[in-house]
Image (cartoon, helix red, strand yellow):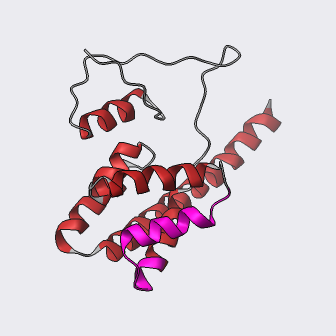
Amino acid sequence: MILRPIEAPDEAAAGMALQAQGLTVLGLEQGASQGGQTQRAAPWEVAWWCRELRTLLRSGMTVVEAIDTMGLSAEPHSTRAEVQQTLLGYLQQGQGLSQAMLSCGRFPAVLVASVTAAERSSKLVEALDDYLRYDELLERLRRQVVSAAIYPALVVGLGG
């Protein structure tokens, strides 16, 4: 039995990342916390990452060159730089982009699945476009739900 530390947003992501590395997960244990609170990963802007990668791929770069360039433009020790370096490391080990994204544990499953399909059809830019449209639709729906909830909450609050 090997104990292997992994950083992931939740247990499901940690399990998937370890399984993607070909390991069998027998159990997961939450790591050390700071100040009585669990350490949480800094927010990660997946839509930004997709836009940047799409732009660099359209300019003629390979995936490895594009991710390396994105890592160089990120602030040192930032979440962006950390994710770019992690992805680059997995890619340099010979993993495909979707496998590297899964191992990184910072990307939504729908994007990873889309990139997996795109690797088979060589349509990565289109897959990134599709994810960006999906993300934009979710954001629009989120704003509409919040907008629709404000009026009833205001009426109930004033009525009380």
Query: Where 50 sits versus 15, above or below?
Result: below
At 40% from the left and 65% from the top, the residue drawn is 131
User: Chief secondary structure of the magenta span?
Assistant: helix
Q: How many marks?
A: 0
Residue 130 figure quarter? bottom left
Q: Residue pushed farthest front?
A: 93
Residue 160 x, y percent position in the rendering: 80, 29
Residue 153 x, y percent position in the rendering: 71, 40
User: Which is more toward the observer, 41 or 133?
Assistant: 41
Query: Where 94 sits versus 129, above or below?
Result: above
User: Which is more toward the observer, 8 or 151?
Assistant: 8
Residue 139 figure quarter? bottom right
Q: Is residue 75 left or right of residue 64?
A: right
Query: Where 9 sits versus 135, above or below?
Result: above
Q: Residue pushed farthest left?
A: 120
Residue 114 appearing in the image: no
Q: Which residues are magenta?
A: 56-75
Q: Is residue 104 left or right of residue 74?
A: left
Residue 55 x, y percent position in the rendering: 48, 79
